Image: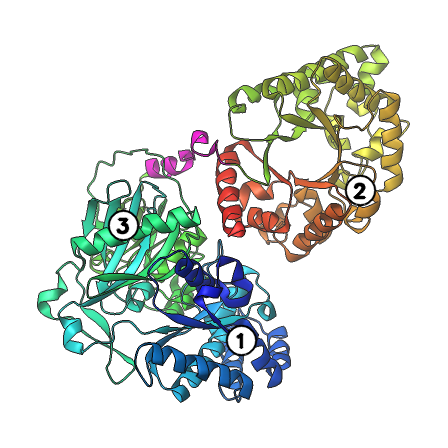
Amino acid sequence: MGLYINRLEELGREDLAKVGGKAANLGEMHNAGLPVPYAFVINTRAYREFIEKNGVSDRIRGLLARLNVDDPVELDRVTGELRSLIENSPMPREIEEEIVREYRELSRRFGKEEEYVAVRSSATAEDVPDASFAGQQLTLLNVKGEEELLEAVKRCWASLFTSRATFYRAKKGFEHEKVLIALVVQKQLGRMEEEDYLRGRYKAGVGFTLHPSTGDKTKIVVEASWGQGEAVVSGAVTPDTYVLDKRTGKVVEKHVARKTRMAVALPEGGVREREVPPEMVERECLTEEELRQLWELALKLEEHYRTPQDFEWASEDGRVFLLQARPVTVLYEQKAMEVEVKHPPLLRGLPASPGAAIGRVRIVKNPQEAAQKLKKGEILVTEMTSPDWVPYMKIAGGIITTEGGITSHAAIVSRELGIPCIVGAREALQVLSDGMLITLDSRKGLVYPGEIQELLARERALAISPEEVAGLQTRTKILMNLGEPDEIERYKDLPFDGIGLMRVEFIIASWIGEHPNYLLEKGEEERYTEKLAEGIARVARAIYPKFVVVRFSDFKTNEYRELRGGDRYEPVEANPMLGWRGVSRYISPQFERAFRLECRAIRKVREEGLDNVWVMLPFVRTVWEVERCLQIMREEGLERGEKFKVWLMAEVPSMVFLAEEFARLCDGFSIGSNDLTQLVLGVDRDSGILANMGYFDERNEAVKRAIEELIRKAHARGVTVSICGQAPSVYPEFTEFLVRCGIDSISVNPDTVARTRLMVYELEEKLRG
């Protein structure tokens, strides 16, 4: 269309960087033939040139560089200054001309001189996995006229710097200057007389193509209320909730709420809230025909995107339109595990974020009161939450709100934080009292008096069935970490592509129990080699032809001393974690003979036909030590080739700095995130004091940058990168970061293999989109 304007037919989900998530998805839906109101998009180039030509970008950068987002007073002051700066800056002539020209075209299309429109923000960081940014930027409804539209554009641009949006970006790790904003200018639906609203001609809400609280993919959930839909999305009203059977479209569960308020688009412009007529307060919103349309649209959305969707919709005179679609930001899977609870519940509400929690009730009215009263692990009880509550929600053991539906702020944030949450529990403030000990079952929306430990046990036992994800193919290989060889019988049918880390220390400690040098001294080295070969072969045989990456021994000196005879060969080091370990042992005169025994065990297994066994060198520090180690391996009959791969563990920062040189000596890198974090941050990972202070965190930006750089350098040399540290098994967001960096494989603990495969599959689907 022009430099600054795009129409929906020009856009698809691949255009997120150009027009943001909301606009990209509207274009995608429009081009898929789904019912989307007519719109045009003011793209991110317009915003970028606006702030640059007005000299605003440098001012933004300077203010944000010094901003402490955890100081609410400073946050409000700085973001207020930024918004005023944007709103009071003039619109460059060329941008204004394109916006006005396209607005006139939209108006003519509907036979109007000046049509009413909705102006919806579409930031480039919204509607992406694990970060919904729900409600962070501004939407202005029922805007009319060129001047009003241009002012609305600047107000929406400025909303990129509300306190809550700025805080949220900082906490989610998004760089402020890299988040841009586009705007959707869309024909306003619901342009009718107020009396028509009072007759129920306009209604709106949200939907999910699965049950967002349980992850049940056989269900579709729809929420609906009278009037404009912003009240449902914000949680200002408790909507009607319908649960549909995905296969048949039949309503299997229905909750009709008391809907006392509605938002009305006024004929003269703007929106106002008014009371719902008494006869409509407890009347259900949706007709059978509207439910049928919503069921069909939900099926089409999921079929098109090939991943569960969260969508907004509106119905005007019985015809349903789609206003927005995005991936479900947090997907929970349900495994049916009924727990019999003997006493009746105190309270019922809507299950919003699944789980169970036990804690003391803390009733608070606002964030300021929460700051004074709420203690970590307590159950936060309030009417509803907004983005200002997030710092306090994070410390709660569970959350109960009296208002809102399963797309309210409390519900969305609780799911992202993994906090059990029940919403719409209208009687909570009457039934519960401060300090009361309660148990939440937020899978069922129930609150019980006292402690019910069985519900916590149920949560520990919940897991995704391997069969559910076994057929999901991912670009990123999902590998498994393994210690004890006998455990392979339990795990061999899990949906993994290979074993990315097999630790021989388990065999040495449990099957042998003696120091290798002690066995050499006694002339029993053959037993050492046989036992190592037996354990490795057991695993390799069980999963053949999938590969097994065997990490050569990585005991520290204090651990070797615990083996029989070990005190005769091991020095006492002040810090064994940074001492004589890994490759530095293999090439040393004191341990070289023992390392050759490990090489012979590998050769023995491979000579038995198990050519799926590869090896990995741990705790690599220098290029020269790897060269010497590879020479020893060659002398023992182990030489890199097409069927025998050698990986290096990337745990020491020197490997990141010299990745190009190390790359010529190996077939792959495997990131040991525990040690890499330790050495990048200078934190002893065995230090409980530092861990409790929050110093040890693999998600630290410095660690992530080191990983990103390693992947980039390795791929430039044609070398693969994996990871076998703890982080991907614990932090879903870290796994997402790795996939976005293009990592080749992720090796996780057995209990998270199925969940990781599902998460990676869904993320790759979204990235392909």
Residue named by callout 1? 2
Q: Position of residue 121 (x, y in %)?
A: 44, 71
Callout 1: SS: loop
Q: Which residue is mark 3?
A: 295
Name the residue rendered at 63%, 55% in the picture: 700
Q: Which residues are magenta?
A: 453-472
Foreground of the two, 591 or 557: 591
Q: Amino acid type of disc 2? A: Ala
Question: Residue furthest toward the right?
Answer: 589
Q: Where residue 663 is drawn, which disc sits there?
A: 2
Tags 2 and 1 in contact by the CB under 8 Å rule? no
Question: Alpha-carbon neighbours of circle 1 within 10 Å: few (<14), some, or many (≥20)?
Answer: few
Residue 198: x percent and y percent?
14, 72
Q: Residues within 10 Å of mark 2 (few under 14, many from 20)?
A: many
Q: Residues within 10 Å of mark 3 (few under 14, many from 20)?
A: many
Give x and y (percent) for residue 443. Answer: 31, 44
What label sits on residue 68 in the rendered view? none
In the rendered image of this protein, does residue 182 appear above or below residue 342? below
- Left or right: 176 with respect to 663? left
* Foreground pick, 493 / 554: 493
Magenta span: predominant SS is: helix
